[in-house]
Structures are given as structure tokens and as C-alpha cells.
Image (cartoon, rainbow, N blue to C red):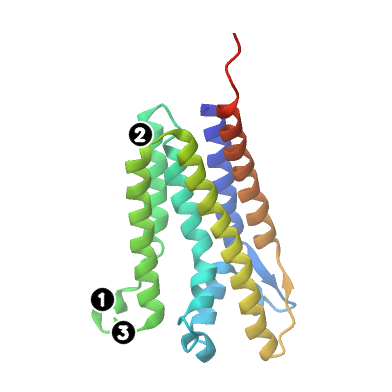
């Protein structure tokens, strides 16, 4: 199980790298952007701010990062070495703090929907890490089920957010192409899902005598 935990951690780490790679590419560097920056750009679009629910496109583009954070916290439970376990959880917490709103939010921009969403996602990530820690003693098959659900939602949210952002760019007649980021993210999450599902199936196999 330790080897699988390392493979899953590696897969999630690579998914994080892919999250920071371009999700859309364009002939000019200004419109070649990763998911996080694309979410920021979408957050200032009037259609996104007035959507129902508000800021949905930005939320969908940011949620894949939350999925990586919670995925790391859940994967940490697989390590038998407590030091490694807490290091992985610490990395997850640092990533959660990456989502924290700028200082302006706490000073005079608490009503800004973009900053408010980032604060909510920070809170959701920290809560997700705490829940993952509490699930430590839960049967591994149930932890696998939770992990599979979190990662699937992350992938689906990413593709839907990318499609919604593409519609906004089309309105400006900006022709973009799907970048390596979303493809790599999907493949890396697929690797983690396969390892998790493989682990779940292995646990169901009856012991041989």
C-alpha cells in the first residue's frame, strides 16, 4: 500500500504542475493562461458576476486545485510513517493558503465577490484537510470512495469551467486552443483514480489459503 501511496502522491503533484500549465493557448502570450489566472480573468467579466450562481465559471476553474488539496490530505492517510503523513498534510495546507484572499479583502474589499470566493475556497480546503484527518481510521475502501468522488468532481469541474471560459473568449472573438494543462491534469488524476480503484478492487479479493 505504501508504494501505491507514493504513486498517488506523485500523480497529484504532477496534476498540480499541470494546473499551473496553460489550459488555453493563443498566438499571443497574453491569452495563453493557466486555470488559476483564467479564473481571475473570468471573475471580472460582468456575465460571470451576474450568473446564477454568481462567479460559477471562476469556481469551476478553481475547484480542481481544491480537489488536489483534499486528494493529498486523503492520500496522506495511506502512509504508515507518521512523519511522511504529516508532511503531505502540511503541503496540502500550504496549497490551501495559496487560495487565501489578498489583504484588501480584510481591509476594505470584503464585499468583492472574487475575493469572497477565494476566502470560501480557502475555508473549504482547510475543512477538507481536517475531515481527511478525521477519516484516518475509516476503512480504506470508504476512504477510496471519497477520494474517487473528490477527484472526479475536480476533473469534471475543470472541463466545464474551461468550456464556460471558452464561451466568454468567443464573445470577444479570441480564438484559443486547449492547452497541455487540462489534458495533463486529466491524465494525472486518471492515474491516481486507477491506483485508488485498483486498491479498492484488491481489497475485495478473497484471501487465498
Q: Earlier in the sequence, mark 2 or mark 3?
A: 3
**Figure check: 74 above or below 94:** above
Frontmost residue, 61 versus 19? 61
Mark identifier at residue 137:
2
Mark identifier at residue 106:
1
- In the drawing, does residue 28 fall left or right of residue 122? right
Residue drawn where x is 66% and y is 83% of the image: 167
**Label 2, label 3: how many angstroms apart (C-alpha)?**
40 Å
Q: Earlier in the sequence, mark 1 or mark 3?
A: 1
Residue 14 visible within the image: yes
Q: Which residue is label 3 attached to?
A: 111
Residue 33 visible within the image: no
Mark 3, Cα crowd under 10 Å, few <14 / some 14-19 / many 20+, is few
Mark identifier at residue 46:
none
The spot of residue 76 in percent (x, y) is: 43, 38
**Label 1, label 3: how many angstroms apart (C-alpha)?**
10 Å
Q: Nearer the viewer, mark 2 or mark 1?
A: 2
The spot of residue 193 in percent (x, y) is: 60, 45
**Figure check: 41 above or below 180:** below
Amino acid at each position: 500500500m505504501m508504494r501505491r501511496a507514493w504513486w498517488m502522491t506523485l500523480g497529484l503533484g504532477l496534476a498540480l504542475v499541470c494546473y499551473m500549465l496553460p489550459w488555453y493557448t493563443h498566438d499571443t502570450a497574453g491569452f495563453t493562461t493557466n486555470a488559476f489566472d483564467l479564473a481571475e480573468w473570468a471573475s471580472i467579466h460582468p456575465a460571470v458576476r451576474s450568473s446564477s450562481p454568481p462567479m460559477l465559471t471562476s469556481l469551476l476553474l478553481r475547484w480542481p486545485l481544491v480537489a488536489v488539496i483534499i486528494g493529498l490530505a486523503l492520500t496522506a492517510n495511506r502512509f504508515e510513517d507518521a512523519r511522511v503523513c504529516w508532511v503531505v498534510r502540511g503541503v496540502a495546507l500550504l496549497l490551501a493558503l495559496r487560495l487565501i484572499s489578498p489583504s484588501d479583502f480584510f481591509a476594505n474589499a470584503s464585499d468583492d465577490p472574487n475575493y469572497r470566493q477565494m476566502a470560501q475556497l480557502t475555508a473549504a480546503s482547510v475543512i477538507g484537510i481536517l475531515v481527511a484527518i478525521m477519516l484516518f481510521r475509516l476503512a480504506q475502501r470508504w476512504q477510496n470512495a471519497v477520494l474517487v468522488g473528490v477527484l472526479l468532481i475536480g476533473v469534471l469541474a475543470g472541463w466545464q469551467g474551461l468550456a464556460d471560459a471558452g464561451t466568454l473568449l468567443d464573445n470577444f472573438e479570441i480564438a484559443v486552443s486547449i492547452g497541455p494543462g487540462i489534458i495533463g491534469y486529466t491524465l494525472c488524476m486518471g492515474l491516481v483514480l486507477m491506483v485508488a480503484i485498483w486498491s479498492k478492487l484488491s481489497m475485495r479479493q478473497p484471501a487465498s489459503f
